[in-house]
Image (cartoon, helix red, strand yellow):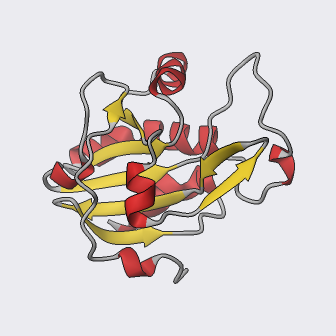
Amino acid sequence: MRFLQHLVGRAMPDVPLEATSGSPVSLARVPGTAVVFCYPYTGRPGYPDPPNWDHIPGAHGSTPQALAYAEAYGRFRRLGIKLYGLSLLDTAWQQEFVSRHRVTFRLLSDQSRAVQSALALPLFETGGVTYLQRITFVLRDGVITVVRFPIAEPEHDAAEVLAGL
C-alpha cells in the first residue's frame, strides 16, 4: 500500500468545498484530527449505475463505505475526530444521499476538482464522466498524516481507520 504515500506530510489545499450542511469547508483549516474518505459515486433509486460500473475494479462500494462510516460516526466523535466524505459529485446528489440514509456527517463536493488537481488524486472515467478513485486520508490540522489506497474492501474502511487511530 505504498501508492500515494508521497502525500503524507502535505497540507490539504486551502479550497472551500461545498458541503451538504450548506456551509463550505476547507480541509486545510480543519483543526485537530479529521478523516476524509474519498469515494467515486453513490447509487440512487431510479437511476442506473454508470456504464460498465460492474466491470471497473474499485467502483462498487461507496454506499456500504459511507454507511459504515455513518454507523461508526459516534466513535469518531467520542475520539474528537471530525469526519467527511469527499467526491466529485455535486452537492444536490450528495444531499439526497444524506437525507435518504440519515447521514449526520458532512459530504463535500470537489466538483471543480480543485482538491483532486492540487493533490493529483487518481481518477477513472466511464460513460464520459470522470470519478475520483477511493482513497482515505487522516489529517492533523489540515496536514495529511495517513493515506489509505487502494481500499479493497470499502465496507471495512471505517473500522480499519478506527483501529489505526
Q: Can I make out residue 59 in this image?
A: no
Residue at the spot x=79%, y=55% of the render? 56
Residue at the spot x=44%, y=42% of the render? 112
Residue at the spot x=48%, y=76% of the render? 4
Residue at the spot x=43%, y=42% of the render? 110
x then y, percent, for residue 29: 16, 50
Q: Nearer the viewer, residue 64 or 89?
A: 89
Quarter occupied by the C terminus? bottom left
| Vertical relation: 118 (above or below) 59 | below
x then y, percent, for residue 26: 24, 45
Left or right of 51, for residue 58: left
x then y, percent, for residue 87: 50, 43
| Vertical relation: 49 (above or below) 124 | above
| Vertical relation: 26 (above or below) 161 | above
Left or right of 145, for residue 52: right
Q: Can I make out residue 128 in this image?
A: yes
Q: Quadrant of residue 123?
A: bottom right
Quarter occupied by the N terminus? bottom right
